[in-house]
Amino acid sequence: MAAARLRTGLRRNCLLPLFETYRLRDLLFFSSSVGSIAAVGGTISPDPYFMVEYLMNSCGFSPSKAAKFSKPLAHLRSNEKPEAVLNFMRSQGFDGVGIMKLISWNPKYLCFNVETNLAPKFQFLCDLGLSESDIVVAIVKNHDILGLNVHRSFVPRLEMLESLLGSRDLVLKLLKKTRWFFSSGVEKKLHPNLKFLRDECGIPEERLSLSS
């Protein structure tokens, strides 16, 4: 009698619907995953939309704009990198308006590594002779600086403009005043136009530098 009940129990277990088996497996996996996350620490958020609230509280965006700018950051589950970026930008003299402008142009700036990406660019601009306030103005005018490699992109562009305009000081003034400093039009339009004025029209370098 006992043996018959055992065989009946085994048959019932074997006839469990397949989806019940998968549900059990998923529950087991979910539980172990939660345990792993909890073991790492409290910086990971289970809410995929927590960046919306973060952008509102930390940067002052409205709910609609925070929702818009959080989309490129949807993969983040921690505010560690954004917090490091914001703290660094504030330490470099950026106010709330300047930070909001940068994030509006490219929210992925909040994913940058401060030590390997942002700090070297600020140091390079400082080494060029720009003050802290000058650097803030230059980056707000030309925010693409943050996404460029200093040696592969920034330095060649700087050297090209210096050779065209004849003055490092003039280049730095343009960096603070114009929004086209890193646009493709500099190479495609400015270079040929300056060459034409110099070679075909006979305008000396000094006048070209002053008029640029």
Image (spheres, rainbow, N blue to C red):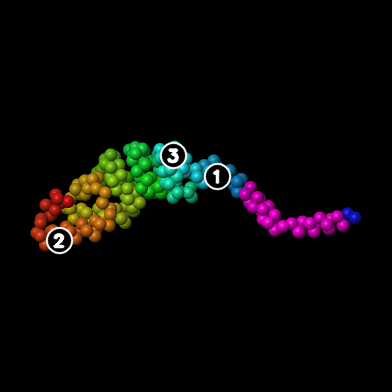
Which tag, 2 or 3, sits closer to the chain's start? Answer: 3
Q: Is residue 123 left or right of residue 7?
A: left
Work out which residue is located at the far left of the displayed protein and give it: 202
Instruction: Assess disc 2: are there few (<14), some (14-19) or many (≥20) residues with their C-alpha within 10 Å of its C-alpha.
Output: few
Packing grade of label 1 (10 A; few <14, some 14-19, many >=20) is few
How far apart in space, not on screen, are marks 1 and 3 (Cα)?
18 Å
Which percent across, then down, holds residue 90?
A: 36, 38
Q: Is residue 23 magenta?
A: yes
| Element on which disc 3 rests | helix
Q: Amino acid at mark 2?
A: Phe
Q: Quadrant of residue 202?
A: bottom left
Residue 45 point in image, percent of width and height = 53, 43
Q: Secondary structure at mark 1?
A: loop
At x 40% / y 38%, what residue is drawn? Answer: 60
Residue stretch rendered in magenta on the structure: 4-31
Q: CA distance from mark 2 to mark 3?
A: 51 Å
Q: Is residue 21 magenta?
A: yes
* Residue to which mark 2 is pinned: 196
- Percent across and percent down for residue 4 are 87, 57
| Residue that label 1 marks | 46
Which mark is on residue 56?
A: 3
Instruction: State whether residue 149 appears in this view.
Output: yes
